[in-house]
Amino acid sequence: MTAGESTITLYRLQACPFCERVVQTLDELGLDYRSRFVEPMHSERDVVKRLTGKRTVPAIVDENTGVTMSESAAIVEYLQSTYGEDGPRAGGVA
Amino acid sequence: MDLGFDIVDLEPTEHVEEGDTAPEFTRPLVTDEYWEDIALSEILDDGPVVLVFHPMAGSFPATYVWQELPGREWGDCQVVGLSIATPYAHKRLIDERGLGEEYRLYSDPGNGVAEQFGIAHELDGMAGVAEPRPAAFVIDTDHTVQYAWVAKEWPDFPDYDELEAAAQDV
């Protein structure tokens, strides 16, 4: 899909296994998202730093909830607890 | 150009012309900070577009084109480049030429957009590599092509003054 309708933005690095882990979770939960790819060099990632305070990826911005966060384990847990079966937004984006 | 010899003529091609609807496509659009898949229709929602096809980043024409485009008056138009260079190479071009947030470049290594526009060009001496022939289109918010220029020689460059005037007219 293109970026137009998605409300979750994933900042990612090509071939980064931590980023792919988040992608897998997004796909499992059937969530639409836009991908923004950044550079391998940390110093080139000011856009991520402005959002999360750190230059690490993956990072997500979820406009549904106002949540911005990094660290793949934390993101996966957040997505599952928010959009998973028992989560407040189970079944996807209202 | 007067080089004292004939430069290479390109074969005639059935390309997108003035009055045609611009073909729709989605490709990674590279900014100074990141790239993401963006449809042409999405940027046309924000205003008319000057779409400039040029040889791949690293070639001298790519450098020349991006020396000429900034600093002109483009009216309401967004000026967007396109080549077969990877997003990484586009990012370096944006950094080197100081294009900042204002100018963005589509990355199309598979050259499919050039095929849609009828301007694909097989590179002699680089087996298996095709890129767009140099071309520039001014596309209005109804997706109609208001100005079209496609190279008939190789190499060739847009008439920047004419392109600028067309952008201001749209």
Image (cartoon, rainbow, N blue to C red):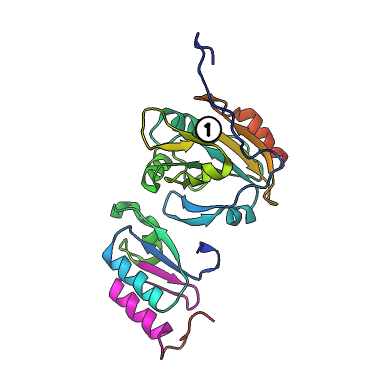
Q: Secondary structure at mark 1?
A: loop
State which quarter of the image contains the C terminus of chain A: bottom right
Q: Residue at x 40, y 85 (%)?
A: A84
Q: Residue furthest bottom?
A: A86
Instruction: Give left or right: position of A71 versus B36.
Output: left
Residue B136 visible within the image: yes
**In this figure, what is the number of numbered marks?**
1
Is residue B95 or residue A83 the one in the foreground?
Answer: A83
Q: Quadrant of residue B109?
A: top left
The percent coordinates of residue A16 (x first, y second) are 28, 61
Vertical comparison of B65 with A89: above or below: above
Amino acid beneath label 1: Pro
Vertical comparison of B42 with B111: above or below: below
Region of the chain picked out in magenta, as a range: A59-85
Asked if the magenta segment contains residue A61, the reply would be yes
Vertical comparison of B132 with B28: above or below: above
Is residue B170 or residue B13 the one in the foreground?
Answer: B13
Q: Name the subunit of mark 1.
A: B
Q: Quadrant of residue A79?
A: bottom left
